[in-house]
Image: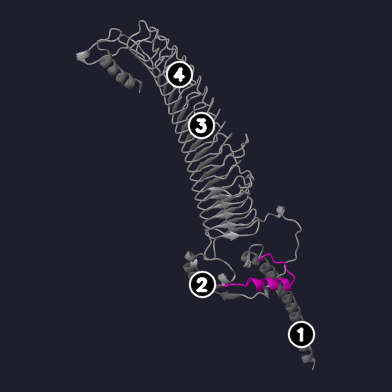
Amino acid sequence: MKNLLLSMCTLFLLHAFAYAQSMNEIQGFAAAPSLTTGNFNIVYGDSSAYRLNTGSGHVIIGAGAGMNITTSGNPFTWHYNPPLSSTFPPSTGNIFIGQGAGYSCTTGLDNVFIGSHAGWSAVLGSNNTFVGAHSGWNTTNGSNNTFLGDDSGSMNTFGQNNTFLGQGSGTANTNGSNNTFLGRSAGKRNTSGFQNTYLGREAGFDNSTGYYNTCVGDSAGIDAGVAIGNTMIGHASGACTEHAGYNTFLGHNAGWENNRLNNTDDGIGNTYVGANTGRTNRVGEYNIMMGFDADFEEYGSRMTGQPKTQNNYNIAIGYKALLGQTKNHGILLGSQTYVSQDYAMALGDSARTMGQNSLALGRQAQVNANNAMAIGYGATTGAANEVHFGNPAVSFIGGPVNWTATSDQRLKKNIQDDVVGLAFINKIRPVTYQFDPSAFKVLDIDIPSDLKSAMESRAQIRYAGFLAQQVDAAAQEVGFDFSGVDRPRAGENTYGLRYAEFTVPLVKAVQELSEKVASLEAELATKNDQFETLSAEFQIMKKIL
């Protein structure tokens, strides 16, 4: 920009001073009154370049502009077209255009100040470009800054290597350096923060001493006053973050309420990717959330100012994946997944886990108890310490080997020989049957529409087995607390049978039958002996007679 302005001013010089002996153009009351040997200066405006004496190559336009400039800087050469070819004396002068522009500059070099009072206090600063009313107003010896827009960098004093583009951008910056602010009021309140990048209207607006932040988007990181090492990309992303650091927010409103309570030790190390992702989290730390509306469950009312409680060390990926209140170490993967307890996992579309240390794996799988698992499409459990596989349409669960149950004697106590065998088995009614799909609706068991055809196919299979209620009644009748009956518990309304456990009373029944057979065999042997004795006696009596 400076070279362009210099070229324009040079053309003006050629036009205005082709035959002027001093090679200066001066207009205005008390304009450059002290100029003695300086050449190739353009000075317009009352009291402009008032103290300039030997300086050359300056363009100073505006009342009071360049009031204190005295000399020129290091040399360079201007060259022009052959008809007017000539080599001008050396200078790396300043360009001040606007009332009071560069007013306090004394020995600053290669500055371009354009606008009313632009660079007003620039005494020693060099290589600055300030464009806009009051831009760089207070800069004294800051260098290598570019401020474009009214009031941009107006309070800068010692800050260096800053680029502020936009009305009011970096207004409060004093000695912050190596910042890039682009947008109206971007980084407006930055004072000593350094190496920040704010792009967008009011992006990083409230930052004062924070550093290593990158905020891109309208109002992104608007409240990040002393935050460190954050990356916030998207409209209003991380908007409420005041102190928290090392967060990554990507998406419209992502992490919007993060660190809302302005505590210095919360809202740290979160990664939210997606519009509205993690929007309501205020104090949670080290969470990973990805997907539109992946968020934390509401707690209280924002209208009453009731704060959200803390959610830490969670991973949520998926559209509207939702983590409950005060939950930690949760993993959510899938659209509209939900976890409401600690150390829980919900994996699959609409999977839900409401129990601690629990897992829901599969589309619409649901767990409502602690230390439980539901695995498979639509699998559910409402009882603690249980694992459920599949849905009512499943017709086969198997593998190449049998399931092994832990049965180590060292893990057992209160061992009793009280299994009821034959009396129980004789009361059980073996039957064949088919499943009735319509009965599931009566029992308020929801069967997804895409499983209805599978249910109809399963209904054609004829099974052999028992009826759970009859087995339960038979066990109670003989006073047998049979663990093979699974009675309904909280959240359940159907009976079940553990067929493998029928082996125990069956073995007992076989043992009882074996005892009876042995007893009958012994009795039969005795009878045979008695018969043989009687037969022998009969033969003797027969001979006597």
Q: Could you tell me how far apart the alpha carbons at marks 4 and 3 are, in whole angstroms?
A: 22 Å
Q: Earlier in the sequence, mark 2 or mark 1?
A: 2
Q: Earlier in the sequence, mark 3 or mark 1?
A: 3
Q: Amino acid type of disc 4?
A: Ser
Using the image, determine if residue 493 lies above or below residue 110. below
Classify mark 1: residues with Cα within 10 Å, few (<14), some (14-19) or many (20+): few
User: Mark 4, mark 3: which one is toward the viewer?
Assistant: 4
The label on residue 459 is 2
Residue 211 located left or right of residue 85:
right
| Residue 440 in sight | yes
Image quarter (top left, top right, bottom left or bottom right) of the N terminus = top left
Q: Earlier in the sequence, mark 2 or mark 3?
A: 3
Residue 201, position in %: x, y?
Answer: 46, 36
Image quarter (top left, top right, bottom left or bottom right) of the C terminus = bottom right
Q: Could you tell me how far apart the alpha carbons at marks 2 and 1 are, in whole angstroms?
A: 68 Å
Q: Which residues are magenta?
A: 460-487
Q: Secondary structure at mark 1?
A: helix
Q: Secondary structure at mark 2?
A: helix
Quadrant in which residue 108 is drawn: top left
Circle 1 sits on which residue? 536
Q: Amino acid type of disc 2?
A: Ala
Residue 13 located left or right of residue 157:
left
Circle 4 sits on which residue? 143
